[in-house]
Structures are given as structure tokens and as C-alpha cells.
Image (cartoon, grey):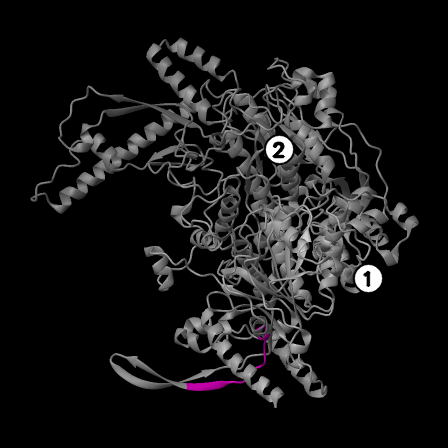
């Protein structure tokens, strides 16, 4: 319970079981209660939680949804003077008036009733006055005790006692000589100390309120040094540990001088359970990765409020959530989403739900370490990333004049979350209590004065709870400009670098918005790189103290905003000026801090690594003016290694052979040795049909393809090359090599090949004949070392990212699984190529007969015009298993919406597994993460503005990938393939359809936000007219986020209103087209998922056109 809510009246009650009862009513069967007042319990009764401190409830939450405010005490209220007024319920009235429940005779007159009522009121008022007088006398006797100190000043009015309160109370009771009352008062004291921090009562004079036995922190003077803080070290020796058991150089160096300050309990290792609040902000996210990579921590519990609650912001945070989920498979949920502070929305009755406070009890999570970073910076609560028209102006935490920084929300969140963590461990023992570390502020500048004040209150709370329950803590006061990868959006440093990199890539110039340097009154930046902060946090997590300690992390450099902008400009290639860069930065002389900590990353190196990260973030797959690794090497810094996730803090690196790679230290691939061979084999081809059979011994090719020579093609036909990739060590390769006559080797440049079976001769045959042999319609490409199990990055490389393996002339690439049942004909490939594009369609109408209520009538339907379309990729929809299952039958009949878990089962069935078997852990982790995304993104509560359009994350693009047709010439198609390939390799699962559905759902939300399309409150054209679905294939084309697509309405949303700015763009485009007599029209780009019904109908029409073309050419 918070010391904010200490109140001045406490009542101790006991029950009299011997009292006579004069009624058989159920309420009278309970023991009669008698109450005596002691020191100040008031309305909360030991189970309430900061009742007098909390505000009125937000209009965004219903009264039933409030999590700890209004359900504890309905029987009494407390006035400002601390007096208690009883609001008696029915049972209380019956106890006090046994005749209350008895029926009155009907002959009582109204006048007599009124006289009786007036008499009762007068008696009640008299009793109330007497009670208040007695209460006043009681509150002004010797029990009113202050915090007294000769050298302290008043800080905060309080209402609780010091550690001497129990002794003075005992003396007063002994003087009165009441053993029975002594027992009552002792019980009241125990309850009092369980539920409230140890502060003192006040007589109303703030000048007399001072601290005693208080570990004070002077906010404005010199910070406590290492020598002064060692007074608070817990010198009681714990379990013996060695230096190697600690994590981090800072902790290991400190262990040499103060070994008693560390124990096996405080050490951070693989057995640690670390709870991080604000895990999605830059510090929390970097700390989680640091603990995983450097300390071997396997279990991290993350809590974050994901503020602001907008669809765009939460979509951006999904990248961090995914990295954490894949790095920590044991992470619960994976993120506990909170409403205010750290109040995760757990259901009542769960193991960690506290029924007394109606909140989550953090102690039930059983963490060994707690790092509280939820409000480490004021920029965490910035509204800059919210569209001005979508801001939540109706929130109780913001106002019309100050919507950028909702200070009230920041203060409320910080204090409530801090107190909830502390209160969860009040009753714990030293063995159960975790190491507690929290982020505070160094308090520089007037711009973050409110933030500094909030952090000061956190420090006071930490001291208060330590005084009550001996729960020590360490507060790290951070500078106002902690920077690095995954910076805080809305902060000056992050936004400046992001704008500079974006303008660099787009215009090869340096442009920053004018309002960046104008926002805020503070011009000074205290710069500190995030990796240096991580080293300090990990060291402090393992350092045991006896009392609260607050230490400051000094910045590496201090500079003005204008100087930072000039220095940032000097890094641009066209603006490179070494003298300007050096003069702009003025590094501070490093001061030794907590445990001898000093910044290790210079400001120049930190800025170079931050810019490099933003370069790769802006263009993750290239091309760009310069990649991040190229930028690092130009500035004499070594790029991150592929497996050093703590360095690059991002997704797993991709193979060097991938068309998506931009990293210097990329991953090797088994296809590196055959990439040139595949390019040579596809020289002059318009399309490539390819398959792979890897990871096992291939004895024969079951799948057969049709090989057509160029002279047998029609005039407009595409030349198709068929490639089959197999292991070099397989029996198939040995057999086909043995079938080549000796004299035929000379035609392939192997004329001097000896006729023997030596290893050297066999190797020359393999090298010389690779990509030269045709078997069952396939040109065989054998890969060395591919018969063993291959990595998940290589397993899907050719299928999902084939752009670097074919010659520049190839325009289309069709991948087919090795277990495809039917032979692949040349006409099959040509038909699919034709379905990648669609010419523009004018408005059209048709008549149909429909039956309604037994009557048949003719209805005229009109389909609107559609733009010219081109598909970047073509796939087929997911097929339901051909099994006798009621659930599958419901899906097949359209009676149920396909869920993610059932879709995953059907995908596994498609891959040859039993869909009822237990899924592998890799697939399960991926699926569970996708299932939780709607609870984060689609949540309309938690301060989400009603002005924001309702865009939902919905996984609905379920596909089969037994064959995939790529357009390898389109840049948008390459970016889509890279998104798909990176998502799939990040999880390491076997089925790639699940990754595709997630990528499409994300892209759809981002496109709708960027194009300002109609939200989900407006039904689509097909939803309004489901009877037209058989007559159009528009729902099969899913738009991409391109400028051309912005000019057209989404084909499935013809009924949606076009925004004014889009209509203006369409008018300008139409005017330009009329002025220019160009025959080439820009095509809108789509992803097409072609249904079997459409494919069958289209195939018939295409065959007719094909037959007519052959007849025409034959004539």
C-alpha cells in the first residue's frame, strides 16, 4: 500500500460469539462485531491500494474494468480531515437495531412514523458528535508522533510512524494497564505494517515534518561516490562464488575489490529469471539481447505498455517482439501488455493475480532480478509518432494545448508501476526478494523537469519501502540522450538520424525538418551510447546493497543540438569534412562512476554505429547509397559478425548468395559453389522451371518435366529452362555420369580425360559436366555436401529468394516441390505466366436470376471498372485435407472462419505430416506469436483514440507453396520475397506458408495506413454482394504499397469513398496522360492467390486462344 494513502483512523474489530440472538435471520447467525479505534486504518482496511492517490477512471475503461480502485471498501468513506463516516449496509443496520427487520403494524400513523424518524435522526447526530469529539481527543493525544531529526527539513506530509512507533505505543498501553487492549493494539500494528510504508502522522504543520532513520539522497548536490555507497553494501557473506560466475567486465573487476558484495544469488547466468519493464523501449530491448548473448540468460519476462496505442506504432514494435520471442522461447505471452504501470491484464483467478489488490502480484512471477525501465526517458510518452488528426484529445492524460507530451500519464505510470513492484515484495524474505534496479534521471535542463521530478519520486518510494521492509534497490540516473540502435522514436537524436539517412537514400542530400531543433527549451544533449549503459546495468544487477543507492552515469560528451546537427551532416558522403566533424564534438573527461564504471564508446564511434544501423533499417535489402557495413568500413570500424546479435541487434544474417543480403559478414551457403553454374545454364532463358531434392540420397527423379527446344516454340512463347538441384554425392549423379560415353566428354572440354575410375578423374567429370546433363527433362545441377541435413537458411533459399541464381535475361521463375504429383508440361508454365498480368477492364453489367421467398426475378448487376494489373507473385490457396473430420467439413462448407492453429495443421498435412500429431517447437513458437498479435494491434482500449481509423491485423492469406511463380524482374517482387525469406528463416520452421500469411497481414495494414484507405468499419464490395463472388476474381488480387496503387481504389473496396487527396492525384494523373501520348500505362502491382475455380475457367479460355494461335501459325 502506498504511503500516499496513509490515513489517520484505524479500527480494530473483534467478534463476540456469546451474544444473545433475538432473530433467526441469516444475517443474525454471524458473530456480533465490536470495533475499537487505533492508529489510522481508515477506509482501506489493509487491503486497498493507493485509493486516495488515484484519479477518476478513464472514460475508455468501464467501471467493471478498473483494476484496483473501487471494489475494496464500499462501507465507508474518509473525509479530508481523516474522520470516518459509516455508510451502513443492510447487515450492519440489523446488528445495531435488532427490530429493524421486523414488520411494523399497519395501524401506525404517518405522523407517528415521522416523529419517530426525527427522534432517531437527533439521537444519531448526537452520537456522531460525541464520536467525533472522542476521535479528535484520541488523535491529539500522545499517539501523534512525528519523524524527528535535528538536521532535516520537511519534505512530504505523511501519516505513518517511524520505527519507534511500536515502542511508544507499548508504553502508552502499559500505562493504561490493559493486556487485552495490548493484544488488540499489537494486532493492529502488525496489520498496519503489512500494508503501509513506515511514515508518520502529522498535525498539519509541514514545517515540523522531518525524516528520521532515513537514507537520504541529496538531489541537487554531489552524487554519492563509490566510497560513500559502500556503507550500504550487504557484507553478510552469501554463498561462495568465483569471478567467472559473474557476467560482464564491470562486475568481474569489482569482485576483485569487494567480493562480499556479490553472491551466487545475485549473479546473472543461465539460471536467472529477469523481469524487465519497458522491454520494448531501446534500453529494455538492448538489455534483453545483452543478457541472452553475453550472460546466457534463458528466461526473460517482459512488460511494456506499448505507448502510444496506435496501430502504426504497435506494428513497428512487432519487430522487437519477434526478435525477443525467437531469442527467448520461454518468454511468456511473449510480452505482458499493461494498461497503467505494470498491471498486466491477467484474468482473475490466475496464479499471479492478487485478489486483495485486484492486480498482478509481481512476486508470483518469481524473478531473480527486476530491472524497471518502463519510463526511463520522457520521449517514451511522446505523441510525435501519432497522426495529428488521430490523437486522443479525449484522454484524461492530455489536453488540447499539450498533446505532444502527456505529462500526467507519464507521472502516473511511473509512480504507480514503481509502487506496485515494491509493494509486491513487502512481505517477502531476503531469500525470496530479487535484485531490484530501476532507471532514474540525472535531471538536466528544464525541458525534462517533469521527468526528473517523477524519477525523484521513484527514488523516494525506493527509500520508503526499504525503511519498512528492508528491500534495497539501486537507481541509475541516466543522461537525457541515450542513443544507439533501436532508438526511441520521438527523441531528438533518433529522429534526426532517421531523417538524415532517409534524405540521403532518396535525394543524396541532407535535409532535416525545421521543427526538430525547435521543439523543447533544452538545447543541451548529454550523450551516452546504449552499450555503455548495458554494461553498467548488468554490473549493478549483480551488486548487493543493504540500503537504497542512487548513482549517476555520466555522459561521454555534452553538446548543443545545433552542434549535433552539424556533426551529423559531416558524416554524409557529399558533405564529408573531417575538421567539421571533430570540431562539432567535444568529449567530456570521463569520470569514474559506480563500481568504477566509465564510458567505453567514444561519441564518434557511437554515432557511426548508430548511422550504420539506420542505413540498414531504411534499406534492409538494398539498394541504397551506402550499406551500413560499408559505412562502418569507410569510418574504420569493423562490421558486426553474423552471429553477434548483441552487436547488430537485429534479424539473423542472410546467406551471401541471397538477393536480400547487404551485410559484409554474411552467411556461407552450400549453393555458393554452383551459383555461377546455374547462371550459365540459364543464359538466354525467359523463364526457369526449377526444383530441388536435397538433404537425402537421391536415387532417381520422380518428377518429370517437358523439355522444349527453341525451334519448337510459337512466335510469342517464352523459352523455358528446367533445372533440378540434387546432391553431388547422390546415387543419381553417379549413375548419370556413368551413362556418358567416353568420347562425349571431349565435346564439353574434357578431351584429355583418362579412361579410368580414379578419384581425380571422377572429380574432373563432376566439375566439367555439372549443368551439362539432361535427365527426364531436367538439367541437373549437383551441389557438394548437400546429402546431409542442410540448414534452414539453405533449405528455403532457392525457393523463396532465387534472384541471384539465374542469368539477367530470366524474367520469371517457377519453383515446384520435388513431390509434386503430376508431370510439368510446357503449356502449364506458359499458362501461369499469362495469369501474372491482367489488362484493364471497363464497367460491365450482366443479368442473373435469383430466387427470394419462392419467387424468381431477374436482377441486373454492374461491376465497376478495374485498372490494369500485374502480379509480383502467383500462388494457389490453401487446400483443406481430404479427411473425414467434422471440423474440416465445416471449413469446407464455409461455416467457420479458418483459425491459425487449424491452418497450421493443414499446412503440415500438405507437407506430408499427420496434422493431428504434436507440432515441433519451432512451429509452435511461431504460431503462438502470430496468434497473440491481434491482442496487441487490434486492441481498441488502453487510451486508443476514437479518431484513429480501425485497421486490424488479420491473417487471411492462406496459401499452398507446392509451386510458386516469381516475377524476378520487379523490384517490388524482390522486396516481397526478401520479407518472406527473412521472416521464415528467423523462426527456423519447416513450413513457409505461415510466414507468408504474417508478411501479407503486416503489409496490408501498412498499405492501408499509407494510402488512407477505408477502415474495417466499411464492408468491402464482395462482403456487401457475396452473390457476385463467382463472377469476379478481384478478391484474388491483393494490392501492394506502390504509388500507382495509391491512385486506385482497392479492387475489393469499390464502395469505399476515395479520400480527397487521392482523388486529386487521380485527376492530375489523368491530365498528364491526356497531354502525353504514351502507350505505356503504369500497372498496379498485386500479389495474386489464384483459386482453383478461377484457374480451371481461365485454363479453358487460354487453351482456346492457344489453339487458335497454333492454327494461325500453321497456316
Distance of mark 1 from mark 2, alpha carbons?
Answer: 41 Å
Residue at the outermost bottom position: 1115
State the residue at coordinates (77%, 37%). Answer: 555
Q: Is mark 1 on a helix, strand or loop?
A: loop
Numbered disc in front, either 1 or 2: 1
- Residue for point 82% across, 44% down: 559
Callout 2: SS = strand
Name the residue: 32% across, 32% down.
128
| Span of residues in magenta | 834-846
- Please provide percent x and percent y for residue 1008: 56, 65
Q: Residue 1040: which quarter of the image? A: bottom right
For this orientation, the residue located farthest to the left is 107
- Residue 743: percent from left, percent from top: 75, 60
Q: Is residue 442 magenta?
A: no
- Spot occupied by residue 463 in the image (x, y as percentages of width and height): 59, 26
Asked where in the image residue 889 lies, by quadrant, the reply is bottom left
Residue that carries the numbered disc 1 in the rendered image: 509
Residue that mark 2 sits on? 438
- Which quadrant of the view contains residue 1077? bottom right
Amino acid at each position: 500500500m502506498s504511503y500516499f494513502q496513509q490515513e489517520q483512523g484505524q479500527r480494530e474489530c473483534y467478534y463476540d460469539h456469546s451474544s444473545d440472538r433475538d432473530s433467526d435471520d441469516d444475517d443474525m447467525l454471524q458473530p456480533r462485531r465490536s470495533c475499537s479505534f487505533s492508529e489510522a486504518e481508515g477506509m482501506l482496511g489493509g487491503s486497498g491500494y493507493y485509493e486516495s492517490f488515484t484519479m477518476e477512471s478513464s472514460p475508455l475503461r468501464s467501471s467493471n474494468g478498473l483494476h484496483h480502485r473501487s471494489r475494496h471498501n464500499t462501507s465507508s468513506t474518509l473525509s479530508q480531515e481523516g474522520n470516518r463516516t459509516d455508510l451502513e449496509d443492510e447487515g450492519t443496520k440489523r446488528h445495531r437495531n435488532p427490530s429493524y427487520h421486523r414488520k411494523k403494524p399497519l395501524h401506525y400513523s404517518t405522523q407517528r412514523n415521522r416523529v419517530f424518524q426525527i427522534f432517531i435522526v437527533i439521537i444519531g447526530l448526537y452520537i456522531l458528535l460525541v464520536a467525533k469529539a472522542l476521535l479528535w481527543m484520541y488523535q491529539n493525544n500522545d499517539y501523534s508522533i512525528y519523524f524527528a531529526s535535528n538536521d532535516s527539513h520537511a519534505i512530504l506530509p505523511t501519516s505513518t510512524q517511524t520505527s519507534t512507533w511500536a515502542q511508544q505505543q507499548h508504553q502508552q498501553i502499559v500505562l493504561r494497564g490493559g493486556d487485552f487492549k495490548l493484544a488488540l493494539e499489537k494486532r493492529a500494528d502488525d496489520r498496519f505494517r503489512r500494508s503501509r510504508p513506515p511514515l508518520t502522522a502529522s498535525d498539519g504543520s509541514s514545517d515540523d515534518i522531518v525524516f528520521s532513520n532515513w537514507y537520504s539522497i541529496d538531489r541537487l548536490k554531489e552524487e554519492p561516490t563509490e566510497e560513500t555507497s559502500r556503507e550500504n553494501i550487504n557484507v553478510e557473506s552469501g554463498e561462495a562464488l568465483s569471478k567467472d560466475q559473474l557476467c560482464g567486465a564491470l562486475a568481474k573487476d569489482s569482485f576483485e575489490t569487494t567480493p562480499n558484495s556479490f553472491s551466487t544469488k545475485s549473479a546473472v547466468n543461465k539460471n536467472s529469471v529477469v523481469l524487465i519493464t519497458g522491454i520494448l523501449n531501446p534500453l529494455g530491448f538492448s538489455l534483453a539481447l545483452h543478457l541472452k548473448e553475453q550472460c546466457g540468460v534463458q528466461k526473460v519476462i517482459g512488460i511494456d505498455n506499448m505507448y502510444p496505442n496506435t496501430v502504426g506504432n504497435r506494428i513497428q514494435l512487432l519487430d522487437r517482439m519477434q526478435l525477443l520471442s525467437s531469442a527467448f522461447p520461454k518468454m511468456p505471452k511473449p510480452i505482458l501488455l499493461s494498461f497503467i504501470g505494470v498491471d498486466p491484464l491477467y484474468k482473475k483467478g490466475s496464479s499471479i493475480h492478487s485478489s486483495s489488490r485486484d492486480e498482478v502480484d509481481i512476486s508470483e512471477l518469481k524473478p531473480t532480478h527486476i530491472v524497471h525501465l518502463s519510463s526511463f526517458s520522457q520521449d517514451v510518452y511522446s505523441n510525435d509518432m501519432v497522426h495529428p488528426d488521430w490523437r486522443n484529445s479525449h484522454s484524461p492524460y492530455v489536453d488540447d494545448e499539450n498533446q505532444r507530451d502527456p505529462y500526467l500519464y507519464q507521472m502516473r505510470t511511473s509512480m504507480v508501476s514503481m509502487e506496485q513492484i515494491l509493494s509486491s515484495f513487502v512481505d517477502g524474505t531476503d531469500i525470496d526478494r530479487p535484485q531490484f534496479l530501476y532507471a532514474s534521471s540525472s535531471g538536466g535542463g528544464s525541458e525534462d523537469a517533469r521527468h526528473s521530478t517523477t524519477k525523484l519520486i521513484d527514488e523516494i518510494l525506493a527509500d520508503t519501502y526499504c525503511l519498512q521492509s528492508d528491500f534495497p534497490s539501486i537507481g541509475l540516473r541516466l543522461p537525457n540522450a541515450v542513443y544507439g540502435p533501436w532508438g526511441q522514436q520521438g527523441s531528438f537524436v533518433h529522429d534526426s538520424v532517421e531523417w538524415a539517412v532517409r534524405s540521403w537514400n532518396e535525394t543524396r542530400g541532407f535535409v532535416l525538418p525545421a521543427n526538430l531543433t525547435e521543439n523543447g527549451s533544452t538545447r543541451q544533449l548529454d550523450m551516452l551510447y546504449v552499450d555503455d549503459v548495458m554494461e553498467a546495468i548488468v554490473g549493478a544487477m549483480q551488486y548487493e546493497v543493504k540500503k537504497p543507492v542512487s548513482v549517476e552515469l555520466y555522459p561521454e560528451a555534452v553538446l548543443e543540438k545545433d552542434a549535433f546537427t552539424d556533426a551529423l551532416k559531416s558524416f554524409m558522403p557529399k558533405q564529408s569534412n573531417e575538421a567539421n566533424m571533430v570540431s562539432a564534438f567535444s568529449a567530456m573527461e570521463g569520470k569514474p562512476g559506480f563500481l568504477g564504471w566509465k564510458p567505453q564508446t567514444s561519441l564518434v564511434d557511437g554515432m557511426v554505429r548508430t548511422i550504420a544501423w539506420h542505413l540498414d533499417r531504411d534499406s534492409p535489402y538494398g539498394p541504397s547509397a551506402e550499406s551500413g557495413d560499408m559505412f562502418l568500413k569507410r569510418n574504420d570500424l569493423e562490421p558486426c559478425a553474423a552471429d553477434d546479435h548483441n552487436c547488430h541487434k537485429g534479424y539473423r544474417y542472410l546467406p551471401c548468395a541471397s538477393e536480400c543480403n547487404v551485410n559484409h559478414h554474411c552467411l556461407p551457403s552450400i549453393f555458393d559453389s554452383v551459383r555461377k553454374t546455374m547462371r550459365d545454364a540459364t543464359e538466354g532463358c525467359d523463364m526457369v522451371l526449377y526444383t530441388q531434392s536435397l538433404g537425402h540420397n537421391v536415387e532417381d527423379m520422380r518428377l518429370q518435366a517437358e523439355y522444349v527446344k527453341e525451334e519448337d516454340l510459337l512466335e510469342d512463347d517464352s523459352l523455358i529452362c528446367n533445372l533440378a538441384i540434387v546432391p553431388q554425392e547422390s546415387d543419381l549423379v553417379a549413375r548419370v555420369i556413368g551413362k556418358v560415353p567416353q568420347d562425349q566428354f571431349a565435346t564439353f572440354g574434357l578431351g584429355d580425360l583418362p579412361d579410368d575410375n580414379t578419384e581425380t578423374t571422377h572429380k574432373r567429370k563432376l566439375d566439367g559436366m555439372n549443368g551439362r546433363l539432361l535427365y527426364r527433362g531436367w538439367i541437373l545441377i549437383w551441389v557438394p555436401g548437400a546429402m546431409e541435413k542442410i540448414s534452414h537458411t539453405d533449405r528455403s533459399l532457392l525457393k523463396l529468394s532465387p534472384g541471384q541464381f539465374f542469368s539477367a535475361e530470366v524474367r520469371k521463375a517457377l519453383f515446384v516441390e520435388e513431390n509434386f504429383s503430376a508431370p510439368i508440361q510446357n503449356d502449364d508454365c506458359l499458362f501461369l505466366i499469362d495469369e501474372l498480368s491482367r489488362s484493364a477492364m471497363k464497367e460491365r453489367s450482366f443479368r442473373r436470376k435469383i430466387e427470394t421467398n419462392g419467387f424468381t426475378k431477374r436482377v441486373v448487376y454492374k461491376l465497376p471498372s478495374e485498372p490494369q494489373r500485374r502480379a509480383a507473385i502467383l500462388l494457389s490457396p490453401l487446400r483443406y485435407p481430404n479427411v473425414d473430420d467434422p471440423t474440416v467439413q465445416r471449413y469446407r462448407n464455409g461455416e467457420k472462419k479458418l483459425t491459425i492453429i487449424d491452418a497450421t495443421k493443414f499446412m503440415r498435412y500438405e507437407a506430408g505430416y499427420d496434422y493431428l500429431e504434436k507440432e515441433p517447437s519451432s512451429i509452435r513458437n511461431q504460431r503462438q506469436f502470430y496468434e497473440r498479435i491481434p491482442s496487441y494491434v487490434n486492441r481498441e482500449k488502453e487510451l486508443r483514440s476514437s479518431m484513429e481509423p480501425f485497421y486490424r491485423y488479420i491473417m487471411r492469406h492462406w496459401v499452398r507453396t507446392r509451386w510458386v511463380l516469381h516475377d524476378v524482374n520487379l523490384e517490388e517482387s524482390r522486396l516481397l520475397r526478401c520479407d518472406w525469406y527473412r521472416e521464415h528463416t528467423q523462426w527456423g520452421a519447416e513450413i513457409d506458408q505461415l510466414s507468408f500469411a504474417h508478411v501479407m497481414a503486416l503489409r496490408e495494414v501498412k498499405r492501408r495506413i499509407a494510402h488512407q484507405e477505408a477502415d474495417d468499419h466499411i464492408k468491402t464490395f464482395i462482403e456487401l454482394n457475396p452473390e457476385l463472388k463467382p463472377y469476379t476474381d478481384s478478391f484474388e488480387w491483393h494490392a501492394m504499397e506502390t504509388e500507382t496503387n495509391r491512385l486506385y481504389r482497392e479492387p475489393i473496396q469499390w464502395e469505399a469513398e476515395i479520400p480527397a487527396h487521392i482523388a486529386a492525384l487521380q485527376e492530375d494523373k489523368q491530365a498528364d496522360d491526356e497531354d502525353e501520348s504514351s502507350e505505356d500505362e503504369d500497372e498496379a502491382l498485386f500479389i495474386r492467390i489464384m483459386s482453383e475455380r478461377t484457374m480451371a475457367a481461365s485454363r479453358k479460355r487460354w487453351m482456346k486462344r492457344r489453339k487458335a494461335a497454333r492454327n494461325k501459325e500453321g497456316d
